[in-house]
Amino acid sequence: MDAARDDVFIDEISFPATDGYALTGTLFLPRGAKRHAVLINSATAVPRKIYRGFASYLAHRGCAVMTYDYRGIGDSRQPAMVGYNQPKSLVGFKASMSDWAAQDVTAAVRWMRERYNTLPLAYIGHSYGGQALGLIENNSEISRAAFVASQAATWRLMTSPEKYRVFAFMNFVGVPLVHALGYAPGWVGIGEDLPKGVFLQWADWVSSPRYLFDSKLPALENFAKFKGELRALCFSDDPWATRPAVELLTSGFTAIKPEVLTVKPSDVGAKAIGHFGFFRPEHRDTLWRGVAEWIQGE
């Protein structure tokens, strides 16, 4: 273990995706007994480090928690052969959003299930992380899933004027730029750099009326395999994961009756939450506690 913080051990690890690609993750472990296992699955173009505070909080409550980066993102991006601590170019790097689900998320669930096989396994999905739950073939291993601002992100269900900005950016800026450069640069405002295939599939889904449900991916049949409990949080000031968009995503889980909750910033004494605000430490005793108690069945 390389660190201890607030009665939590933190360990940097590496584990193989289903195709053998090396993924980097972080384990957050309680000093005392482990009562639950939790896998935190990131949003698009978001490195795992933004979930560190929330993961430590869950570990403090007795959970064995793992965060990790999808291939091409954060520490799961290959290093350059020259230069100090420089990432390798994503030009020519093969990956898509459906690859992230089939190869990376599937492997992360498998790794947690095998390592903590006596504990109930919970799944936290932020934005894309929630979408991926429906696409993985082993989602039946999950007992409870909590979605945070996770939605079927078609531009049509976003709020105005954001919906028009997103449509224009994706189709008239993002797609041409990605074809020209061979990858999606983070400096255009998307977060981390993205592999070309990830961005192009994302743009296709965003432009489709029913997002990924219009893609005809064979993996869509996995939505019906999930039999656990599902609670999805949407925030009234989030222009992307609006309640209709969250309800569209959760409607794909046909074997269960998902619970969708709308939270206003004023409900938790905040001025704003938006798409990323849940993970700010100021919500430790409100939003964090609520999700933790739910996934632990308290």
Image: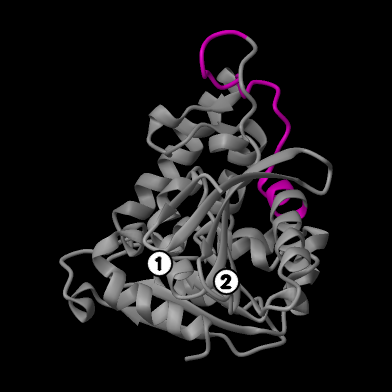
- Judging by the rendered image, the residue that carries numbered circle 2 is 249
Q: Residue at coordinates 49% horizontally, 65% vertically from top-left? A: 150
Q: What range is drawn magenta here?
A: 82-102
Instruction: Look at label 1 and name its amino acid.
Output: Tyr
Q: Residue at coordinates 47% horizontally, 91% vertically from top-left? A: 298
Q: Please tell me which residue lies in front, 241 or 12.
A: 12
Question: Does the magenta-highlighted stretch encompass residue 81?
Answer: no
Question: Does the magenta-highlighted stretch encompass residue 94?
Answer: yes
- Judging by the rendered image, the residue that carries numbered circle 1 is 57
Instruction: Look at label 2 and name its amino acid.
Output: Leu
Q: Describe residue 123's horizontal placement relative to residue 289 as left or right.
A: right
Label 2 vs label 1: CA separation? 27 Å
Disc 2, SS: helix
> Where's residue 134, x and y in %?
69, 68
Q: Is residue 90 above or below residue 277?
A: above
> Where's residue 73, x and y in %?
57, 37
Mark sitting earlier along the chain (2/1)? 1
